Image (spheres, rainbow, N blue to C red):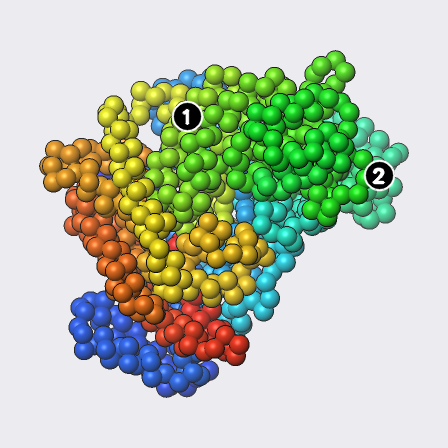
Amino acid sequence: MSEQTATSLTANKANANSLLRRDVRFLGNILGEVLVHQGGEELLEIVEKIREMSKSLRAEYLPELYDEFKSTIASLSPDIRHQVIRAFALYFQLVNIAEQNHRIRRKRDYERSAGEGAQPGSIEDAVKVLKERNIAIEDVKDMLDGISLELVMTAHPTEATRRAVLDIHKRIASDVMELDDPTLTHREREKLREKLLNEVFTLWQTDELRGRKPTVIDEVRNGLFFFDETLFEALPNVYEELERCLAKYYPEENWHVPSYLRFGSWIGGDRDGNPSVKAKVTWETLTLHRALALDKYSEALQDLMGLLSFSTNIVEVSPELVESIRADRENVELNCVDIWRNEQEPYRIKVGYILQKLANTRDGAANRYESPEELIEDLKIIDRSLRHHFADYAADTHIRKLVRQVELFGFHMSKLDIRQHSQEHENAMTEVLQKMRIVDNYAELSEDAKVELLAKLLNDPRPLTSGHLEYSESTRECLDVYATVYRAQKEFGINCISSYLISMTEAASDMLEVMVFAKEVGLFRKEADGSVRCTLQSVPLFETIDDLHAAPGIMKKLFELPIYREAVSAMGEVHEIMLGYSDSNKDGGVVTANWELRVALNDITASAGEFGVKLKFFHGRGGALGRGGMPLNRSILAQPPHTIGGGIKITEQGEVLSSRYGLHDIAYRSLEQATWALITAARLAKYPEQMPKVETDWDDIARSISETALHKYQDLIFRDPDFMTFFKESTPLAEVGELNIGSRPSKRKNSDRFEDLRAIPWVFAWTQSRYLLPAWYASGYAIEQFVQGDNGRMQKLRDMYTRFPFFRSLIDNLQMALAKADLLIAREYAGMIKDGTIRDRIFGQIEEEYARTLRLILDITGQSEILDNVPVIQESIRLRNPYVDPLSYLQVQLLTELRSIPDDSGDAELLREVLLTINGIAAGLRNTG
């Protein structure tokens, strides 16, 4: 980079930061006007007083100011308190919008200043490195053929923001972006301000809380919102950029990149612990998916009809196009689309017939498209004809993108995964085998006996079930799911569903049970000639630390079974395996979960390699730090490069969806960075000598730290008899369950056991109370036990942080957690614990461990403050904390009042205020809400 470019970039960065402050100040002033209008000057004065005291406390802790701050909050009348909570919560919504817009602005500023230079983390940066390292074009093509990323939307309940509120956010974001337009007149700026004032008024008068829990279909529609609003356009734009860069650096090839990046979904298919997800709900989900896909293609084709006005009076179209129109006229009756009357405009005529065939596809009528490939072929006929009369620009601009969209989204929009708990399959198999008098009690068989029996049943062409037998409701539902998948593959294409995920996979039999049920409906079939046909794969979900240890042995046992190995061959010699970050973290703590996941990745890959099977690892990361959350590009590069050969899947959960995919430019940048990471990882896998040199003892050191951390973590979480009391009484766990943010219950079973608590409310509650305990606890103790005051050992850890990607990622995630935790405020939550002895003892342990972890992380990184390595995030947290703090103090006060009321009387208004603080804190802490 030239000195002039660097100077220009620095100046632009300073200017961009001033624009961010301008936007925050601008929106803050508008919110101030709304507060005065809705609550009078008194409301604004109270909000400003609390804000100033909170800022002062952050700058310098003074006991007398702290007491005054708490006293001011405690003295608020219920009516004013309610409005104060909403004021702070709304402020965060506006700041989040300003920061998202700022990300877009910074990218544009960089591109303007850098000129031909490539932005770090961009697609051009990745391709440019390939060229600079003299990687041959054939190797580039091999790498692109081998990379694969599927981002899977889930309905995990951590998105606290309503769809109606998200719509307002999007309008505000668009309006704020217009402020950067230097051509706006004074009057236009005034009108823009009036429009924004109206939007913030609307936001103030819109209920942030859902009046009821969303249904599964509500969640499906929320997921499809992102396809409709951003992904249908942003995803093909990423491909277009990759092909542009490849053509720039490797111009000798005519590039059409394979479809390496797609989206999937669990919403409507994930029935683990959610009794609302029935087979008919899954079918309705798939129908909604197809409807949106066909609607998007129809919209694009309507636009094409207006654009393709080429006349045969001037150009000569291809004979192929003429023939295809003739065939359409003979076979397709136009009854949904107006016939194009101008015979000299054949492209418009052809588009009319395509639109009609799409309508027939939607209605299930004759002369429809049987597959997306048939639609692509019609589009390619248009493409080839345009190039026939040298209208290449029109073909590249209009047709090529639509072809890519059909390749990516098909007639199913996104691939749907099915998920169910392993116990449900065992229960159903026990009943089915008992009714067929094959075995009296399958559940009581040994694991070896189960595997032997299930393998025998897979090899046997005879059915196990009968329409003449009565089954229990749960078994009937279990069987109906497979029938629905078979019907869906016939109706929507074989790619609409191909993975059946099994929660709590603990043995090979858990996966074979799914294959046996798949055989019942034709998803698995052994033909008369001995060949195997399989269109649905059992995907194990290894979640707990014990499951991760057992995983390599389980997979080896399966691959040794000839019938199972043939099923893998029928699925392209690739086997999908899901690793759970949330439950492993809850089970073993952040350090051990990260280490054990790394070990499992390597060991399972080695086990599959013995049998010539490629693995596609599915990483079940949450948005929160305590559930494996991190930026998309970092989560890809965190994997050992040799483990990505069969592709990667990653969950995109809850609040991540709106923050990453709510705005087109943010979605594009996130997907661009993911592509950069994929290409970088593929390069390192192909050329391992380009990776930083890792010392042979670093794995041993990480293992040692992990083992120590596990004991420390479980001593508190599992072995301290008072811990659950501490957790429940010092966090809003119970109240989080009242927040209508998901259709699924917060517990797998109706019990208060730690084991039955889902990882999501576990992390959510710790975050709300500002401990963030699952994201850092036990790490400092484990590091200290390794170092033991030895400078040489500390230097080892510093070297690992510099050159060992796994360790660096772990330490940086710990930094983020420590920066967002606040034990001064957590102490206020601990004050709600009734037994002072329990409170003081456990909080003292947590406080000691926090201080220890903070000190050691700074020593390893060589920083003077946490997050010195990412000053943008450091500054964002610093600026946000004074606004989050009042909500935390208010939440403690409200929880204390609410919990003092006898259970049978309750107080709906108090609970509502608690839920408003939960929403506000989630917005304030962002990726940890």
**What residue is shown at x 53% (from left), y 71% (from top)?**
207
Q: What is the number of the mark on residue 827?
A: none
Indicate which disc residue 468 carries. 2
Q: Which residue is depicted at the point 73% across and 48% down?
A: 473
Q: Position of residue 753 (x, y in %)?
A: 46, 54
Indicate left or right for 475 with 612 as reference: right
* Residue 393 visible (yes or no): no
Q: Horizontal and vertical percent for residue 785?
A: 19, 40
Disc 2, SS: loop
Q: CA distance from mark 2 to mark 1?
A: 46 Å
Q: Quadrant of residue 360?
A: top right
Q: Nearer the viewer, residue 560 or 803?
A: 560
- The correct choice, above or below, for 41 with respect to 706 in the image is below
| Disc nearer the start of the sequence (2/1) | 2
Q: Going 28% across and 53% down the picture, which residue do you hit? A: 818
Contact flag, marks 2 and 1 (Cβ < 8 Å): no
Closer-to-camera residue (755/798):
755
Q: Which residue in the structure is indicated by mark 1? A: 603
Which sits in the foreground, 842 or 232? 842
For disc 1, the neighbor class at 10 Å (few under 14, some 14 to 19, many from 20) is some
Residue at horizontal 47 percent and vertical 69 percent from the top: 915
Q: Is residue 532 left or right of residue 576?
A: right
